[in-house]
Amino acid sequence: MTKPFTLQPLLNLAHQKNDAATKKLGQLNQQQQSAQQKLTTLQQYRRDYQMKFQEAAQQGMGPADLRNFQDFINRLDQAIRQQQQVIEKAKTNVQTGRHELMDSTRKMRSFDTLAQRHVESEMKVEAKKEQRLQDEQTGRFAAQHAHNKNDEK
């Protein structure tokens, strides 16, 4: 009978942590993509608003309207800068998530290797036991066969 792998609980935990790290990295990638899409939308909105501003300026506008346009463009620029900071933070989080996944994968593989070595070792022990039993049976058979030949003489 084979002995159970004593590190099995740690192997199971390593697999769970690796699955969690994989899931977390997926979420972090999704957050980064979402942040990038939001930045792209803000930048497009600013370009569109800038074009409206230029068209309105060509047709003539009062100082209050001019100030309102400029204030709104400044707020859009500020939102764009903030969104760029969000993206940088998201990129850092993705990098951290990648490192965590690589680390958990390495640990999981180490435990997998240990488990495989345990299985191989147990198989060798079982093979030796079977060989010993066969040798004993062969020895008994040979002894009994020799004994029977001596009785026949």
Image (spheres, rainbow, N blue to C red):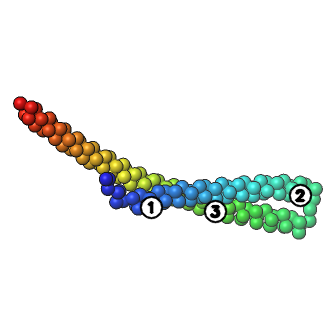
> Does residue 79 appear left or right of residue 125 in this picture?
right
Residue where numbered disc 2 is placed: 57
**Considering only order in the chain, which callout, 2 or 3, is on the residue closer to the N terminus?**
2
Residue 70 in sight in this render = yes
Instruction: From the viewer's side, name the closer residue of 128 and 66.
Output: 128
Amino acid bearing label 3? Val
Quadrant the C terminus occupies: top left
Of marks 3 and 2, the one in the foreground: 3
Q: Secondary structure at mark 2?
A: helix
Q: Quadrant of residue 136?
A: top left
Instruction: From the viewer's side, name the closer residue of 142 and 134.
Output: 142
Of marks 3 and 1, the one in the foreground: 1
Residue 128 in sight in this render = no
Q: CA distance from mark 3 to mark 1?
A: 33 Å
Residue where numbered disc 3 is placed: 86
Q: Secondary structure at mark 1?
A: helix
Q: CA distance from mark 2 to mark 1?
A: 65 Å
> Does residue 109 appear left or right of residue 60 in this picture?
left
- Residue 100 x %, y %: 48, 58
State whether residue 115 is above or below residue 63: above
State whether residue 145 is above or below residue 62: above
Q: Residue furthest left?
A: 153
Q: Secondary structure at mark 3?
A: helix
Q: Residue furthest bottom?
A: 64
> Does residue 56 appear left or right of residue 26 in this picture?
right
Q: Residue furthest front?
A: 152
State the residue at coordinates (76%, 66%).
Answer: 75
State the residue at coordinates (79%, 62%).
Answer: 73
Q: CA distance from mark 3 to mark 2?
A: 33 Å
